[in-house]
Image (cartoon, rainbow, N blue to C red):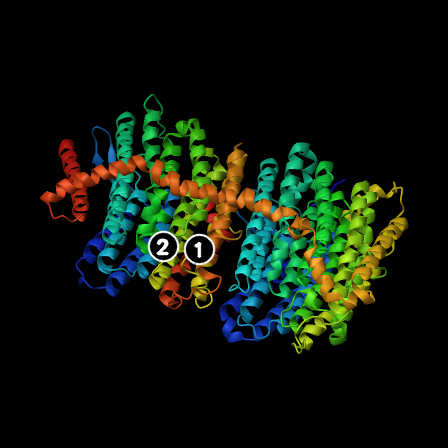
């Protein structure tokens, strides 16, 4: 199988505009923020929308398939031989571009209301616009270094936005943690680039993928494994996931855009983009599949033990991305990408819906102090309900189709163990999502806020728009197997993988897996109902929740001790070494001998001082004088010698 | 072409003339200093390929006052002129006139070093450039012992350099060899000559375990001077390895590559972990320099062509961001009267421009993709890996991760968090200060996107 060649050298200037418009927005908001005022938000919303329109206009160019070249190219710069930079728009990057600019536009629009009155309104939109630019750099680059530049810049945007309210120490700490863990991923990707460049003398995707078959198996596994470090850090996969729950310190629209819909799916994009590498390395496929599967399960388990509405959603994001990573890892690229696509809508909707609640309750995020909100906020209730039905995979909501593809993909590509994990995770997902819904919206209100903010139309309209794709886009695009629009769209890119497994169907049919998964979802729903939504549960909710808090298993409240282990093994040990070197070795060992010399020099100085002015600068004068007379003497002496 | 000579002489002469200004003058000396530095910048561009030479010695070996840039030193000299102009423009210290005069002499002596095409001239300016820094430490430093420590270490290096130069001249017959491709020295004495050069270069960079003069020096010098010293004077050793070690004694650099690489790697990790726990903002940057220059030593030791191209980019990048970091920290210290990370905090709210400048410089230092530091690191490591060295690459990547931790800590501890009550916040960057750091920050962005001229060697 030959993958399509990703050539460098084409010209498609529309790509440049599509890519740079958000950057322009960021620069303008940065430079003229105070003068722009509220206009800053509208400007960014407009530019992101313009990017979306340009992406839509590029549909034809992105899907053209002429002479083995799929998509449209635009050259940028060349640094030195092998370092050529360009942009590439093909079906894979087009899908990401649509989500980044489309969902991005809705979330920016929502932020106009959410961030109203914030002291740093323009700064927020500058960061958001910068993020869109960085994420476009990531998905549009046609080479590994450009990808890495985007990779680093989205990390920076994420850092700025997590720490947006930087007077809060918790936000500052969360931002730092996210940044450093993401640099671990960047370092992994850099190593992959070194391996690839040493082999093919180029950073281009096309060159690397064309040569993928000639890599030694160990080398190819090394490339994939180090790329996996990058994917794991960015996409919050075990054990590099600990930054994502903390990242919820950022404003809620940020959580929706960056930490749910787009940036955290970069790992999925990476594996899908490097499909030709993974296809040649079954071990790497198993590695990524296992990382994704374990993350899906662990994220879901931790999601059951959270009380903060945004942290529940954060663990759910981690778990859902685990699904996507698992799918693209085992080779079910279409399935993984379809889950990315639908997840972007319903997870954004969940976060924005949670944002409506948080905004209305004066920044209350603890579900134990919510309850009964469906009476106060029926709109938010319906938004959350449809999104929960979508994420749990209830037919015919969009999540059903994509999750089905992912879970069935495990069987298709021969990983029954991952299938079992995914099915179990689907049941747990159903439990914790309905738990969230019941705790927040059913029963009696348990908080103190009597009259909060009523969300304005700028917040409600984008959420309402998101409901449509969450409900229907799966059925519209992904039902119908190989003739579905989704499958036909990706046929030139990933058709070969699907064709390879089509002739050997697994023992359990697709319909049967749907039934199994749906049964588990129903079980999860029933347990959640039994614990939080029966009449007794609603009546003594306050003492029951207090009891549940007190009896939460300690393994879960400590989040499986991953944070503690990282802190002990890496952070503490580096600090210990630093203190030992800086406070012991440097002054007392390495510098010791020279301090003695300095002592003698000063002693000598004291002797000389008794003859002289006593100013220490006198020595320096002597030094200059000595050096000068040395030059003068030598110049003239040798001049004399020559004649 | 006499212009080349003028590049070296003009700053030194201007420095001497500035002493003739009134004792309490600030504005004229600062303006004149900046103008002279900008003029050297322009002259460097005009005289890129020019040379000037006059015979000096014919016995015991041939030597000449021979000046002219090499492809590598051209960029370092430009960096020097730029950093000097930016640093002098906003100098605010006691006895400004004397300080500016010293800064110009520092620039002139270092230009002499980087433009030297003769080893003996190189060795001469190597010692001369210690003098302004020594004066700076004596007159404006925090502790006189620091001046001595700086002097003893670097003069010891200067001594071995001079001996090695003399031996080279006697054996080879001429010291007019910098920038020549055909002047290779081999033989029984050659390893010792290389050792003499290498010791001087390792002290100057500095490289572990010869670095202990550096943190107090960088901490004690006034920020305009330390920004130039850390940006450019530290590059003298690295330039020496490239222009003298690799060009004249390549066999021995290759033969002793492994110990050099080990020292580079130790410096890289050592500097990084120590920077992680420093509470003095300037010392964080000082130890980070140890770490960053370790990477360039690794590049030199690999001897790989791509790694060396990357090393040039990184030399320039490190110069730009360390100068910018020290300047911004200097502005901060002038305002707050302290540079302790424990005492400062929350300055970002009321000083967005100060925070922005520190942020860009810190991001370049931690190797953010898109800025100059990243380009250097990436290309160096691509080359080092290609040369077959795997473990130094892994060490360097660990260093990059630690760098992100200490640079983010530096930025956040100063700018983020709640405002500290007992530290007054005295105003954001003035337009002049902003104008002074802007060229450095702009250059970081430009080199980060388009490093092509630096890679064309």
Residue at the top extreme of this rendering: B188
The spot of residue B102 in percent (x, y) is: 24, 53
The reply to whether the C-beta atoms of the residues labelled 1 and 2 are less than 8 Å apart is yes
Whole-Å distance between the Cαs marked 1 and 2? Answer: 10 Å
Residue A508 in percent (x, y) is at: 89, 44
Judge from the rendering whether residue B421 lies leftward or rightward of residue A316; answer left or right: left
Please name the residue shown 44% across and 68% down the image: B350
Q: Is residue A567 above or below residue A111?
A: above
* Left or right relative to A576: residue A346: right
* Residue positioned 55% across, 71% down in the render: A121
Which residue is situated farthest in the left direction here?
Answer: A611
In the rendered image, the vertical position of residue B311 relative to residue B356, given as above or below? above
Is A532 in front, or is A128?
A532
Q: Circle 1 sits in a helix, a strand or a loop, which is it?
A: helix
Determine the chain carrying the residue at label 2. B
Q: From this viewpoint, is residue A476 visible?
A: yes
Report in which chain the residue with disc 1 lies. Answer: B
In front of the other: A507 or A75: A507
Residue A316: image quadrant is: bottom right
Q: Residues within 10 Å of mark 2 (few under 14, many from 20)?
A: many
Mark 1: few, some, or many residues within 10 Å (few <14, many ≥20)?
Answer: some
Q: Which residue is mark 2?
A: B82
């Amino acid at each position: 199988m030959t993958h399509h060649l990703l050539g460098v050298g084409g010209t498609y200037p529309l790509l440049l505009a599509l890519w740079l418009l958000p950057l322009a927005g960021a620069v303008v908001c940065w430079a003229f923020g105070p003068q722009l005022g509220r206009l800053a938000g509208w400007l960014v919303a407009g530019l992101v929308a313009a990017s979306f329109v340009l992406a839509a206009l590029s549909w034809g160019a992105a899907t053209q398939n002429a002479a083995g070249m799929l998509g449209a190219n635009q050259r940028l710069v060349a640094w030195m031989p092998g370092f050529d930079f360009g942009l590439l728009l093909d079906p894979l990057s087009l899908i990401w571009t649509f989500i980044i600019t489309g969902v991005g536009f809705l979330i920016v629009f929502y932020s106009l209301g959410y961030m109203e009155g914030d002291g740093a309104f323009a700064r927020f939109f500058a960061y958001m616009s910068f993020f869109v630019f960085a994420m476009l750099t990531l998905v549009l680059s046609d080479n590994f270094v450009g990808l890495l530049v985007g990779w680093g810049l989205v990390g920076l945007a994420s850092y700025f936005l997590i720490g947006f309210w930087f007077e809060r120490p918790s936000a500052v700490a969360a931002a730092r943690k996210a940044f450093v863990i993401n640099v671990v991923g960047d370092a992994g990707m850099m190593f992959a680039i070194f391996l690839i460049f040493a082999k093919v003398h180029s950073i281009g995707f096309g060159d690397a993928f064309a040569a993928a078959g000639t890599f030694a198996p160990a080398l190819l596994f090394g490339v994939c494994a180090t790329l996996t470090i990058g994917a794991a850090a960015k996409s919050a996969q075990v054990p590099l996931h600990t930054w994502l729950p903390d990242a919820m310190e950022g404003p809620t629209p940020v959580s929706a855009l960056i930490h749910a819909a787009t940036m955290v799916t970069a790992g999925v994009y990476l594996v899908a983009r490097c499909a030709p590498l993974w296809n040649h390395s079954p071990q790497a496929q198993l590695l990524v599949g296992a990382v994704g599967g374990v993350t899906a399960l662990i994220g879901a388990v931790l999601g059951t033990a959270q009380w903060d509405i945004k942290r529940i959603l954060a663990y759910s994001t981690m778990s859902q991305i685990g699904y996507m990573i698992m799918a693209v890892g085992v080779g079910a690229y279409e399935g993984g990408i379809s889950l990315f696509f639908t997840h972007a809508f319903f997870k954004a909707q969940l976060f924005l819906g949670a944002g409506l609640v948080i905004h209305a309750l004066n920044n209350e995020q603890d579900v134990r102090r919510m309850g009964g909100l469906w009476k106060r906020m029926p709109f938010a209730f319906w938004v959350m309900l449809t999104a929960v039905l979508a994420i749990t995979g209830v037919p015919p909501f969009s999540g059903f189709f994509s999750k089905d593809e992912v879970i069935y993909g495990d069987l298709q590509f021969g990983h029954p163990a991952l299938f079992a994990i995914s099915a179990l995770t689907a049941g747990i997902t159903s439990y914790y999502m309905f738990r969230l819904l019941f705790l927040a919206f059913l029963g009696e209100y348990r908080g103190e806020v009597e009259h909060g903010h009523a969300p304005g139309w700028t917040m409600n309209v984008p959420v309402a728009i998101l409901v449509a794709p969450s409900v229907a886009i799966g059925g519209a695009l992904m039902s119908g197997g190989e003739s579905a629009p989704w499958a036909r769209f990706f046929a030139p890119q990933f058709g070969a993988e699907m064709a390879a497994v089509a002739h050997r169907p697994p023992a359990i049919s697709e319909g049967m897996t749907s039934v199994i998964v749906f049964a588990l979802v129903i079980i999860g729903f029933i347990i959640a109902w039994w614990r939080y939504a029966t009449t007794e549960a609603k009546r003594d909710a306050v003492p029951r929740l207090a009891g549940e808090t007190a009896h939460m298993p300690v393994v879960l409240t400590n989040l499986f001790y991953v944070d503690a282990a990282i802190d002990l093994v890496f952070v503490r040990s580096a600090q210990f070494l630093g203190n030992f070197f800086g406070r012991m070795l440097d002054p007392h060992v390495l510098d010791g001998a020279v301090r003695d010399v300095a002592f003698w020099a000063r002693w000598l100085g004291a002797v000389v001082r008794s003859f002289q002015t006593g100013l220490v600068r006198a020595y320096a004068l002597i030094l200059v004088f000595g050096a000068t007379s040395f030059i003068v003497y030598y110049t003239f002496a040798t001049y004399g010698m020559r004649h | 072409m006499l212009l080349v000579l003028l590049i070296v002489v003009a700053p030194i002469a201007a420095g001497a003339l500035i002493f003739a200004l009134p004792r309490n003058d600030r504005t004229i000396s600062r303006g004149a200093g900046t103008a002279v530095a900008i003029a050297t910048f322009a002259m460097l561009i005009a005289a890129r390929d020019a040379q000037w030479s006059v015979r000096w010695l014919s016995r015991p070996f041939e030597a000449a006052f021979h000046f002219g840039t090499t492809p590598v030193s051209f960029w370092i000299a430009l960096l020097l002129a730029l950093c000097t102009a930016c640093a002098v423009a906003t100098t605010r210290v006691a006895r400004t006139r004397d300080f500016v005069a010293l800064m110009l002499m520092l620039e002139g002596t270092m230009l002499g070093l980087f433009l030297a095409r003769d080893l003996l001239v190189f060795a001469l300016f190597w010692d001369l450039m210690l003098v302004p820094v020594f004066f700076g430490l004596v007159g404006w430093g925090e502790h006189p012992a620091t001046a001595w420590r700086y002097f003893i270490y670097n003069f010891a290096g200067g001594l071995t350099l001079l001996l090695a130069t003399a031996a080279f001249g006697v054996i080879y017959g001429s010291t007019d060899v910098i920038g020549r491709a055909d002047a290779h020295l081999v033989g029984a004495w050659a390893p010792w000559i290389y050792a003499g050069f290498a010791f001087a270069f390792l002290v100057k960079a500095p490289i572990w375990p010869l670095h202990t003069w550096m943190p107090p020096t960088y901490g004690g010098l006034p920020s305009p001077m330390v920004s130039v010293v850390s940006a450019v004077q530290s590059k003298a050793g690295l330039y020496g390895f490239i222009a003298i070690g690799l060009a004249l004694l390549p066999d021995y650099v290759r033969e002793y590559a492994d110990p050099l690489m080990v020292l580079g790697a130790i410096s890289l990790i050592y500097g990084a972990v120590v920077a992680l726990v420093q509470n003095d903002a300037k010392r964080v940057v000082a130890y980070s320099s140890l770490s960053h220059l370790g990477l360039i030593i690794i590049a030199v030791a690999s001897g790989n062509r791509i790694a060396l191209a990357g090393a040039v980019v990184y030399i320039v990048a490190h110069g730009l961001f360390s100068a910018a970091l020290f300047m911004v920290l200097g502005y901060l210290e002038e305002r707050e009267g302290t540079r302790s990370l424990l005492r400062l905090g929350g300055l970002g709210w009321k000083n967005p421009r100060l925070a922005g400048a520190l942020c860009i410089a810190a991001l370049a230092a931690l190797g953010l993709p898109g800025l100059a530091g990243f380009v250097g690191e990436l290309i160096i490591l691509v080359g080092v890996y290609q040369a077959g060295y795997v473990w130094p690459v892994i060490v360097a990547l660990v260093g990059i991760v630690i760098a992100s931790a200490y640079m983010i800590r530096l930025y956040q501890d100063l700018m983020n968090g709640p405002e500290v009550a007992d530290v007054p916040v005295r105003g954001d960057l003035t337009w002049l200060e902003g104008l002074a750091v802007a060229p450095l920050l702009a250059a970081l962005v430009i080199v980060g996107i388009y490093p092509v001229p630096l890679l064309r060697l």
